Amino acid sequence: MPPRSNPSARQQRLGAELRKLREDAGLSTEQAAALLDTNRTVISSTEAGRHGVSSERVRRIAFAYECTDQALVDALVAMCGDRVHGWWEDYRDVLPSTFLDIAELEWHAYGLRVSTMTHMPGQFQTEAYARALFRAAIPPLPEAEFEARVAHRVQRHQAIDRPDAPPYELVIHEGALRTEVGGRTVLRNQLAHLMAAADRANVTIQAIPFSAGAFPGSGQSILYARAQLPRLDTVELDRATVVEFIHPEAQLSKYRLQLDEMQRIALPPEKTLDLMHAIASQL
């Protein structure tokens, strides 16, 4: 396959895992290149996600590196191959690549755990709500990009709506449920949309009430995407205008524990629905 100048987060992750396999085998890039009958530039490009890799190539690499974890090899094979032309590809060269990476991460996840503190989750924002959020950007977005961001945001629900959608667990703070983004009518409609989403078999929504006080992870929103194996999980964090993808196991473990604690202190789903109904009735 030809080199790619704009690798997706998924390909970058595959490359990083292949680098871990090489390092675990105690091989330098030169030694790996000799084993695979290639050159160190190809090894480096593959590990950086810039060079596409086939499923057959991944299995050959795993064999050369003496990896005996067949479940891991199978999971890596599932991550390779030609890029899937998902709906997000329509926005390539239109929106920042991180927008596409998040949508692709959600689409391929085996399960999604999400926490939001100040806004409704991107996967279930209505168009009016998304418009109000993006209109608040400073400096103002160019009109073409504004419209593209809104359209992209609204389409993220496809990862949750499709027939084979993964389990989706949301923990949302009461503050996000009450903040009148776009005004009272927009919020009322947004709450109705979220309550309808809660009826889906794969969706669980829990609210953290103001009375819960302080709790771990209260300062940020978290998107935890489960993969075929726990070591391949990914956490996506929004830090102001920067999107960060996290893979190290120690960090993954921390965010799993944070989400566990959030779910522990949050209202159960039925009481969460009662809270959303009560807020909507006050608008």
Image (spheres, rainbow, N blue to C red):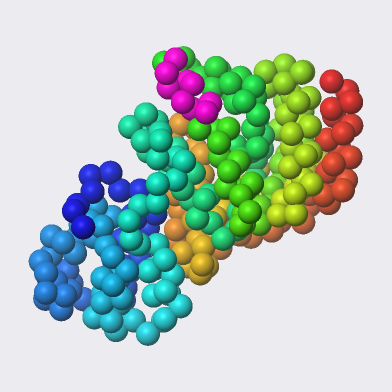
Most frequent secondary structure within the magenta stretch:
helix
Depicted 174 relative to depicted 268: above or below: above
Tell me the residue at 53%/26% (across/down).
150
Q: Is residue 212 visible?
A: no
* Viewer-closest of 226 and 172: 226
Image quadrant containing the N terminus: bottom left
> Between 187 and 1, which is closer to the camera in this rendering?
1
Q: Position of residue 158 (x, y in %)?
A: 58, 43
Residue 75 appears in the figure: yes
Residue under the point 87% across and 48% down = 270
Quadrant assignment for the C terminus: top right
Frontmost residue, 240 versus 230? 230
Q: Image point 69% across, 58% down: which residue?
A: 260
Q: Which residues are magenta?
A: 143-151
Residue 48 place in picture, x, y as percent:
26, 55
Residue 146 shown left or right of residue 278 in the figure: left
Q: Is residue 103 above or below residue 202?
A: above
**What residue is drawn where x is 74% and y is 37%?**
194
**Magenta segment: does it hold 72?**
no
The image shows residue 74 at horizontal and vertical percentages of 42, 74
